[in-house]
Image (spheres, rainbow, N blue to C red):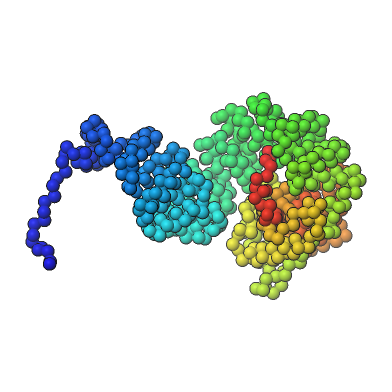
């Protein structure tokens, strides 16, 4: 039967102003009007007259959480649940309180109970995801967030966390899709804008990234993390001067943060702003006095810029402030050794190795200093001891090879077998290109756009050129990706061809799969070269030639060639190149990372553009991530 449209609806009884629910309703109305004194009076009356009423207990719990009394809030919520164990909202409220008390495991249990009681409780799924992230369980957290957006496709917080997890997994395109949805659903969400900007920056969509990050900063003008992300994005975009200014502004806000000083000085160096190099440390000293952490960082930068005396003076002062810091002792030993004060350095190296035996840099630099002092026999023994607990440390292996050669030890040839372990591959062009020259011209154009600085990075080996930042193979540019595919095939072939020799540090690590540990491009100007060096983070290393000067030849003098065997220790005598490889456009050279290598300077007009990368066995990736600390 149809309802009579003219019938008067029944009158709903008004809430009893003496009933707790009525009083709470009255308090909420007064709070909306801003009459907080009246609100406080009502709450005091409720607590006095109805201390155990569920609505009053819930209100008391929420107020306790707001005021930082989370332990009291949890106790009140537990009291409520004891009386009503099937209330999913109460289970969720208790879980949130337990999270604030760092009791994430218990919080997970209560949230799972809430979802048993109410499977479609969207916020319970979201909160479960946050708890699981706190417990370092990203995969089940992702599943919880996905369930939340299945129930509510515009749940911006869940979409944002999905984007953040996918970003950490390297699934950048999928991450961006979810973050775009989050921003569309909640354009005023700081987190959505912030993570979207971060992902866009990693995708090299720099202008969009900076725009999104600036919108995030607009939502939280005091956000330090947004300011830092903008500075990093400006640097990635090649806007070096704006990036320098952004880092400086951050340093003025937080002069104690070492990361900012490192970023600022390294950027000033590659931008050619030598007058700004290290200047931030002066500001920090004015604000903070002598801070040992910042002094350690500054001394390291001085060592890299070959200001050894300045590093020594700074480190001696730092050790007066923090004599217990062994990393300062070890670095001072390196500064002394670099100046030829070898006997003084040996005393400090010995102390550093004894006090901090798991810091491999002490062993590495001590052994090299012994070699410089003509103590090859002591260097050999030290390097062999170090290999006892770091069998594949590339610097130690490189140092041991030098000690063997200085001592005339026959093991040198077995360890450094250039004819067996240095291999060249002339890579064919992709099907889209008619010849090697055409492909490499296009490849060079892509890489030229990525060379943003005016000079080499301070912590790299090239002299008279520039180097790209970040991971080159992460660039989603067609020629770079074609090259990566061809290189991957060549590396796989190299590994298949390794001898079955469990005693050799390269062959012993043979694995079916591998990963690229780092990739970059170097561009050398006329007269440029690479200092002799090894690659500490690699297993296999490389050089690929994309562009050479047009009149490049010099076959007789080997100018511009890749050389192997000569160290950067200026040992004289036997310390000279043993093996050379001629550069050819389209040629890839693979070799063990511990081999000492560099380049002969070339005088030609024009430049030389190369790609380099390090490879490690995939099975060793996890172990390497947990390797020995480096000062």
Q: Determine the residue positioned at 76% across, 46% down.
A: 391
Q: Which of the image's four quarters has the N terminus?
A: bottom left
Q: Nearer the viewer, residue 105 or 215?
A: 105
- Using the image as rendered, state which of residue 94 and residue 437 is in the foreground: 94
Residue appearing at x 48%, y 52% in the figure: 141
Q: Nearer the viewer, residue 582 or 282?
A: 582
Percent coordinates x, y for residue 129 in the rendering? 45, 50
Residue 590: image location, x then y, percent: 76, 59
- For the point 89% across and 44% down, the residue is 406
Number of numbered discs:
0
**Above or below — where is 277 with respect to 543?**
above
Residue 220 in sight in this render: no
Eyeballing the image, is 108 above or below 422? above
- The foreground one among 424 and 619 is 619
Image quadrant of residue 51? top left
**The C terminus lies in quadrant:** top right
- Can I make out residue 376 in this image? yes
Write down the quadrant of residue 352 in the picture.
top right
Q: In the image, is 567 to the left or to the right of 476? A: right
The single residue placed furthest to the top in the displayed view is 320
Residue at 57%, 50% in the rendered image: 235
Residue 506, x across and y down, in percent = 77, 54
Left or right of residue 160, residue 396 in this image: right
Which percent across, then down, holds residue 318? 66, 29
């Amino acid at each position: 039967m149809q309802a009579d449209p003219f019938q008067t609806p029944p009158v709903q009884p008004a809430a009893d102003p003496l009933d707790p629910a009525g009083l709470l309703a009255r308090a909420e109305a007064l709070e909306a009007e801003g009459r907080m004194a009246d609100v406080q009076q009502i709450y005091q009356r409720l607590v006095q007259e109805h201390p155990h009423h569920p609505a009053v207990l819930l209100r008391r719990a929420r107020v306790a959480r707001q005021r930082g009394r989370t332990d009291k809030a949890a106790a009140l919520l537990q009291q409520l649940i004891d009386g009503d164990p099937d209330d999913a909202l109460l289970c969720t409220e208790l879980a949130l309180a337990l999270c604030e008390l760092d009791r994430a495991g218990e919080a997970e249990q209560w949230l799972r109970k809430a979802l048993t009681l109410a499977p479609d409780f969207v916020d319970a799924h979201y909160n479960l995801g946050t708890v699981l992230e706190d417990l370092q369980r990203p995969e089940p957290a992702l599943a919880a967030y996905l369930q939340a957006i299945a129930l509510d496709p515009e749940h911006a917080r869940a979409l944002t966390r999905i984007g953040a997890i996918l970003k950490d997994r390297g699934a950048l395109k999928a991450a961006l899709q979810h973050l775009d949805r989050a921003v569309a659903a909640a354009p005023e969400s700081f987190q959505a804008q912030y993570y979207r900007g971060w992902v866009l920056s990693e995708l090299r969509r720099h202008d969009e990234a900076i725009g999104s990050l600036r919108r995030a900063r607009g939502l939280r003008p005091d956000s330090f993390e947004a300011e830092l992300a903008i500075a990093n994005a400006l640097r990635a975009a090649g806007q070096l001067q704006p990036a320098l200014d952004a880092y400086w502004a951050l340093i003025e806000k937080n002069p104690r943060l070492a990361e900012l000083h490192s970023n600022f000085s390294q950027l000033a160096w590659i931008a050619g702003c030598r007058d700004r190099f290290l200047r931030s440390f002066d500001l920090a000293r004015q604000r903070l006095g002598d801070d040992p952490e910042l002094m350690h960082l500054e001394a390291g930068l001085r060592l890299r810029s070959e200001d050894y005396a300045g590093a020594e003076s700074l480190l001696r002062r730092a050790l007066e402030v923090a004599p217990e810091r062994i990393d300062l002792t070890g670095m001072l030993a390196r500064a002394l050794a670099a100046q030829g004060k070898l006997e003084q350095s040996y005393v400090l190296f010995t102390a550093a190795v004894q006090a901090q035996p798991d810091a491999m840099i002490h062993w590495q630099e001590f052994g090299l200093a012994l070699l410089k002092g003509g103590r090859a026999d002591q260097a050999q023994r030290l390097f062999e001891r170090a290999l006892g607990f770091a069998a594949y440390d590339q610097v130690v292996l490189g140092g041991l090879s030098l000690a063997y050669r200085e001592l005339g030890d026959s093991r040198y040839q077995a360890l450094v077998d250039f004819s067996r372990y240095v291999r060249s591959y002339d890579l064919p062009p992709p099907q889209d290109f008619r010849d090697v020259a055409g492909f490499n011209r296009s490849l060079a154009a892509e890489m030229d756009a990525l060379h943003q600085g005016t000079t080499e990075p301070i912590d790299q080996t090239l002299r008279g050129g520039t180097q790209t930042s970040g991971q080159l193979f992460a660039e989603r540019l067609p020629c770079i990706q074609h090259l990566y595919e061809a290189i991957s095939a060549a590396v796989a072939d190299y590994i298949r061809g390794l001898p079955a020799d469990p005693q050799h540090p390269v062959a012993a690590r043979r694995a079916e799969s591998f990963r690229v540990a780092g990739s970059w491009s170097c561009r050398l100007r006329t007269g440029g070269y690479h200092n002799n060096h090894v690659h500490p983070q690699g297993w296999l290393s490389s050089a690929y030639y994309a562009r050479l000067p047009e009149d490049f030849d010099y076959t007789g003098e080997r100018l511009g060639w890749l050389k192997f065997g000569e160290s950067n220790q200026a040992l004289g005598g036997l310390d000279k190149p043993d093996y050379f490889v001629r550069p050819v456009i389209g040629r890839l050279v693979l070799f063990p990372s511990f081999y000492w290598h560099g380049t002969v300077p070339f005088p030609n007009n024009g430049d030389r553009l190369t790609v380099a990368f390090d490879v490690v066995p995939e099975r060793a990736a996890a172990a390497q991530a947990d390797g020995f600390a480096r000062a």
